[in-house]
Image (tube, grey):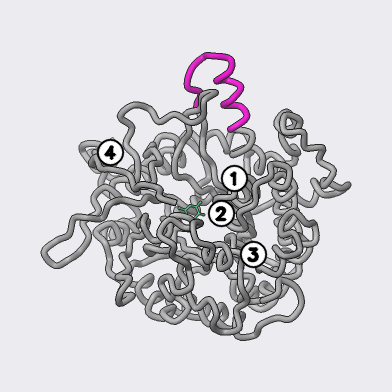
Amino acid sequence: MSMNESTFVSFPEGFNWGAATSSYQIEGAATSGGRGPSIWDTFSADPGRIADRSTGAIACDHYNHYRSDVALMKDLGLHTYRFSIAWPRVIPEGVGAVNGEGLDFYDRLVDELLEANITPMPTLYHWDLPQALEDKNGWVSRDTAHAFGDYTEVVVSRLGDRVNTWATLNEPFVSANHGYVTGEHAPGRTSMLDGMAASHHLMLAHGFAMERIRSIVTNANAGIVLNFTPTEVASNDPADIEAERHVDNLENRWYIDPLAGNGYPSETAEYYQWDQSEVLDGDLAVISAPIDFLGVNYYTRSVVSSDGNELPDGAPVNTMGWELHPPSLGRLLRWLHSTYDFPSYTITENGCPMPDDVRSTTGQILDDDRLGFVRDHLIEVHAAIEDGVPVSGYMVWSLFDNFEWAWGYGPTFGIVEIDWETLERRLKKSADWYSSAIAANGFARPETPTTYKPWVSFEQNW
Ligand code: FCB
């Protein structure tokens, strides 16, 4: 190997470099353009639910800034922009009347992206369920899965002549678990069995959406986005081993197993006394119909003991307290490929909130730690590709600082800073680095590993 090959991390030709966002986190314009209320409008209006009592009502106001935002993406050189479509903007009541103005917005956004030579990658559901459907029992009701199929048809019929890459759901685990089991996300309900019913209806909704996408878009490139938290067991204690298996089943295998045709992990279903009565004949076949790609969201790993999750001593963490552990991404990709063998994988989210408290004399945020995080994870992706895992792209989370759900505006994930007074967008150092990596289809391998500077995590004060 020449010096050049060993010091330059070079990605395969056609590697897809992108950035991701989601509707409720950036769009704002919550009551404009005929949009109906979502569960996140209701939830964030409830004092005590969001750390800083903020909402996504204005957020980055991307709804009104989309043109200049696409120009910025073009300047960065992004190949793909992963965004989500707000169901309540398209069908305000969840079912029935379509809001033409809402569809027009996504139509204009898609045209603007194509004009800039950026591939649109819409996700049909990134957690902003129409409130009207939650009022009818939300994802605990099977009707919501059917409604999602109909909504998919409306959106894909309008955009499918120009968009062939589609993701159905973002992280059904978080929708079901945080929304219906722990209550930390909208709609804020707390029942394990409701969560299990919700998880099945979400997966069914994915299957219905795949059917509609395939029937409308002949060359569709369609899949689902799952989040993974690779687990490790804290000790050889049998209680720890059992705890690790449950966490792994619930967080990782619960979604990918039915997707791969293996059904829900039965041991864990039995443990929580879920009788699977919601799973009707034929459902598992709908859920496991082939996908073209699996979207992989990766942020952190989990070291599990029977007392819960343990943070290894001295482990670096982000401002939300999540351990920074790049090797787990490589391990995850190899595990996915050897266990499930999907045709292709895209990293649909990876990124981290950092303090962002160092600026250059011109005011640019010098986020070397975020830059290092992204680079370290890309090195893992590169190594997995070299080992034969078909990873076709990487989308950094996130393009912008945004409304980070129950954490509000505290954690900043963006490679682009938003000035919350003026809504001005400013590139952080990591954005400049990412842009040059895209241009070179790779980057110089650092001589020394990234050292993340120590700092104190935010207090969760709600
Ligand atoms: C993921 C979500 C995304 C963002 C990141 C930090 O779970 O998909 O919207 O909040 O976490």
- Is residue 18 visible from the viewing direction of this image? no
Q: Give the magenta range.
A: 232-247
> Residue shown at 55%/48% (left/top)?
345
Q: At label 1, which amino acid type do we have?
A: Thr
Label 1 neighbour load within 10 Å: few <14, some 14-19, many 20+: some
- Depth order, front residue of 135/432: 135
**Helix, strand or loop under label 4:** helix
On screen, residue 264 versus residue 313, left or right, reads right
Quick one: which residue is furthest to the top in this view? 237
At label 3, which amino acid type do we have? Leu
Mark 1 vs 2: CB contact within 8 A? yes
The amino acid type, in three-letter code, at marker 4 is Ser
The Cα–Cα distance between marks 1 and 2, rounded to whole angstroms, is 8 Å
For the residue pair 98 and 386, the one nearer the viewer reads as: 98
Can you tell which quarter of the image residue 64 is in?
A: bottom left
Q: Can you identify the residue that label 2 sits on? A: 185
**Of callouts 3 and 1, the N-terminal one:** 3
Q: Residues at badges 2 and 3 in contact (C-beta under 8 Å)?
A: no
Residue placed under numbered mark 4 in the picture: 6
User: What is the chief secondary structure element of the magenta stretch?
Assistant: helix
Q: Indicate the quadrant where residue 223 lies.
A: bottom right
Q: Secondary structure at mark 3?
A: loop
x 82%, y 49%: residue: 283
Q: Are marks 3 and 4 in contact (CB under 8 Å)?
A: no
Residue farthest toward the front in the current orientation of the protein: 47
On the image, the x and y values in percent for residue 335 come to 55, 33
Residue that numbered label 1 is attached to:
182
- Mark 3 or mark 2, which is nearer the start of the sequence? 3
